[in-house]
Amino acid sequence: MEHVVVFAEKGRFAGWPANNGAWLWDGQEILVGCTTGSFAADQPFHRIRPPFTNLLCRSRDGGRTWRTERPAHFVGTAGELTDPPRAWDFTAPGFAVRVVGDTYHGSAEKRGGFFVSGDRGAHWEGPYAFRGLEKERQLEGMIITARTDYVVEGRAQGLFMLSATRETLRDRVFCARTEDGGQTFTFAGWMVPPSDPWRGVMPSTARCADGSLVAAVRRRRMPDNVCWIDAYASADGGAAWQPLGKVGETGAANGNPPALARLADGRLCCAYGRRDRRQMVARVSGDRGRTWGEETVIRDDFPREGVADFGYPRILQRGDGRIVVIYYWATGERPEQHIAATIW
């Protein structure tokens, strides 16, 4: 495994690729988002102090070298939500979506929204509203807490895996559908329903060869703060979801979200942070998420002392088959949280 630095800046904290999203083009060009702020060693958990800045990091050589981009009119700098001016072509070569919601990492949009790029993230438009969801009875009185997780189904068809809540840390995951290129959305179904007693948030979804969907979801049991990853499957385009069982443990302190990818050979690979062991790990499934192999340790050189604040990965497979896992990390030599990648 080869570890590389994606973004690091003296006096800055950088984190949460899972909140921002990652994209791959031509099997080689990678774009990943992150959130930065002033490094604050005196903070009890996230050692960051606002104001937050959302950045993009781009690699044109499969993740070996990176450059930082600060796009205009992006998360944290754009204006109020508006209606999409036209239908988007989700299959366009340079298409990308960045979802926002009511989170504390550079976004506070309680209604949820999204930014769109047609040129591989060089320029962005938005934020646009999830028009139609405000009328859905199932979401009445709820705040949207979504991050970026979507599946393209066709030129104007797409599924967006979102989350909503009525109170802090009680999120539930649902699926929304658009049939008109993002101009309107409808509620498709709950992945983690309101009847489930524990938090379900930050899904990462892959489409299998047979067209079915598998999602890995961050879970948390209150009040003892036991945290883990569950898998869910849908055979009807996101309307009904069946729990498949646990993928892995993520430790206390709010755990860690998963990053899921379908590999070229059809297997699923899920990466996540284990805060209890201060490790980035991955597990592979050969039966569409029903069972998972042993954990592979991706990285374990996080400092033994202090708060275990790391992870939030995204995962991509390059055209040559190599896997790129992107996350935030710290080491004894580089104690400030920064964005790193492991090429595997």
Image: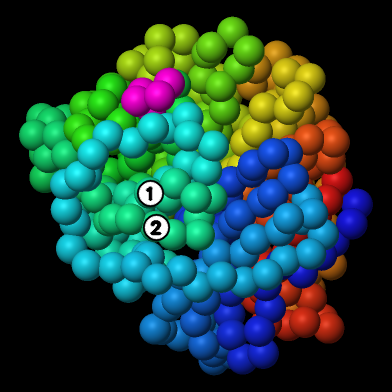
Asked if disc 2 and disc 1 are in contact, CB closer than 8 Å, the reply is yes
Quick one: label 2 or label 1, which is nearer the N terminus? Answer: 1
Q: In which quarter of the image is residue 131?
A: top left
Relative height, residue 55 to residue 172 (above, below): below
Relative height, residue 110 to residue 269 (above, below): below
Could you tell me residue 92's position as x and y percent? 48, 34
Relative height, residue 39 to residue 108 (above, below): below
Horizontal placement of 199 versus 303: left or right? left
Could you tell me residue 82's position as x and y percent? 16, 53
Tell me the tag on residue 116: 1
Q: What amino acid does circle 1 point to? A: Val
Relative height, residue 226 to residue 152 (above, below): below
Could you tell me residue 226's position as x and y percent? 53, 49
Q: What amino acid does circle 2 point to? A: Trp
Q: Report the residue marked by disc 2.
A: 124
State whether residue 44 appears in this view.
no
Q: Quadrant of residue 90?
A: top left
Q: Is the magenta stretch mostly helix, strand or loop?
A: loop
Q: What stretch is highlighted in magenta?
A: 154-158
Q: Which of 135 and 288 is in front in this view?
A: 135
Tell me the tag on residue 290: none
Determine the CA span between mark 2 and mark 1. Answer: 5 Å
State whether residue 86 appears in this view.
yes
**Element under disc 1:** strand
- Tell me, yes or no, whether the highlighted magenta stretch contains residue 36: no
Horizontal placement of 72 versus 28: left or right? left
Crowd around label 1: few <14 · some 14–19 · many ≥20 (10 Å)? many
